[in-house]
Amino acid sequence: MTPQGEPRPLPVTVLGGLATGVRDCVADLARIEVPALAVLAVRVGSDGRTVSWQVYERRGPVGGGTMSPSRPCSPNALPPALLTVLLRLARTARYRHLLLTLPPGMAPDLVALDVAEDHIRGQALADYLRIDTVAA
């Protein structure tokens, strides 16, 4: 909570890169070792059009889904539906940190910038999410 009693934005670490095994290992270790951490793992299908996501907590998966955006996935941004998932995770106030893992080829710095500046239904994501770290 801020001094005014408002919730603080949820810190987000964006993790990308081509070494998927290393990325997944880091995510698994963080999930187990960091209290109140949620991992949002994003995957893009081989067709470049299907996006799946899974939310993990310490004990394992707690939610997920698959979507087919109207356009192929951009390496610079998450589909708007995934931004809504991020916002929903932040609004639960259940987590103290969020680790967002990206598929190979998706630029973590550009995704972080998108999250920091985007809006969902007129609501700034920055009111609920704060980019803490970007790594690849």
Image (cartoon, grey):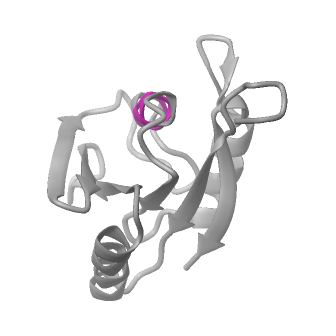
The answer to whether residue 33 is above or below residue 130 is below
Query: Which residue is located at x 21 percent, y 55 percent?
Result: 45
- For the stretch drawn in magenta, the main secondary structure is helix
Query: Which residue is located at x 41 percent, y 39 percent?
Result: 94
Magenta stretch contains residue 122: no
The answer to whether residue 6 is above or below residue 78 is above
Q: Quadrant of the N terminus?
A: top right
**Nearer to the camera, 62 or 93:** 93
The answer to whether residue 124 is above or below residue 9 is above
Quadrant in which residue 29 is drawn: bottom left
Hey, which residue is sitting farthest right in the picture?
A: 3
Q: Quadrant of the C terminus?
A: bottom right
Residue 124: give x, y in percent of width and height.
70, 25
Write down the region rendered in magenta. Answer: 82-89
Residue 10: give x, y in percent of width and height.
60, 45
Q: Is residue 97 left or right of residue 130?
A: left
